[in-house]
Image (cartoon, rainbow, N blue to C red):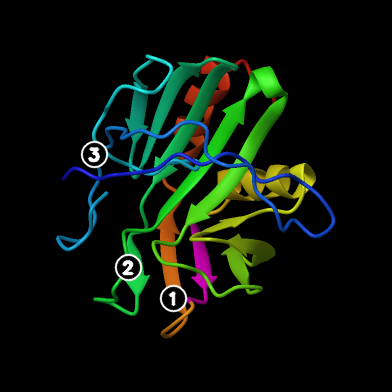
Amino acid sequence: MRCRVALKRRCRYGADMRECRPLQLSFLVGLLFSISAAAYAESSKKPGEAAQTTSGSQPERLGTADAWTAYAYSEKTGKVCYLAGAPKKSEPAGGKRKPPVAMVTHRPSEKIANVVSFVEGYPLKEGSEVSLDIAGAKFVLFAKGDSAWARTPELDKSIVEAMTKGKQAVVKGTPQKGPTTTDTYSLAGFVQALALIDKACDVKR
C-alpha cells in the first residue's frame, strides 16, 4: 500500500512550546507496511511514495524491520535520518482521520537527535496534551496541529530509550471534534530501525 506523508521540522524547545518552525521541506516518501484498507500510509515525516525533495535529494530507504522503516536524505542544511511506523491497532475503528504515524528523526548538522513525533491524522484539540504509555512508563506530549511532540530533548531521549525496551506504545489524543483516539504501536523491529538511522547519521548511544 502506498502512503502519503509530510515531513515536519522539530518544534522549538521552550517553556510553552507554542511555536513550531515551519516545514522547509515537503515530499512523499516510500514506505511499505500493513495498515487498514481505508488508510493511506514524516518525522515527522509520514509514509508515502518517494518523490524528489526541494533540495533535489530523494529519500533512501535504509531498511525495514517489522513495522518500522528507516530512511535518510540530504537537504541544504545537511543529512536527515528518520524512521517511521504505523500502529497495529487504532480505536475507534473506522474513524474519519488520516493514518497515524510514529517517527524518530535525527538532524546531526543541527545537533538534533532522537526527535519523537506522533502524527495523529486529524487536528488535535488546541491546548490539549497527548499521552504516551510504553510498558507502563507514561509520558505527556504537547499537541500542535495534527502532531504530538516531546517538550525537551531529554524527554525525547527518554522516550526513545523506553521504546527500545518496550513491546508496544499506546498513544491517546483528543481531536478538535469527536472522541479520544487510541493508537497501539508494536515496537518489534524498532531497535533495528533505530540502529540504521543511528549509523547513517552517526548518532552514538
Q: Is residue 168 left or right of residue 14?
A: left
Answer above or below: position of 123 versus 66.
below
Residue at point 52% right, 77% down?
174
Answer above or below: position of 127 versus 56.
below
Q: Is residue 201 left or right of residue 139?
A: left
- Marks 2 and 3 in Cβ contact (< 8 Å): no
Residue at point 52% right, 72% down?
173
Residue type for callout 1: Thr
**Residue span colored magenta:** 167-175
Spatial CA distance of label 1 from label 2 is: 10 Å
Mark found first going from the N terminus, 2 or 3: 3
- On whether residue 44 falls in the magenta region, the answer is no
Mark found first going from the N terminus, 1 or 2: 2
Quickly name the residue at label 2: 97
Spatial CA distance of label 2 from label 3 is: 19 Å
Residue 74, horizontal then vertical, whole percent: 48, 16
Quickly name the residue at label 1: 181
Residue 17, horizontal then vertical, whole percent: 74, 56
Residue type for callout 3: Leu
Residue type for callout 2: Arg
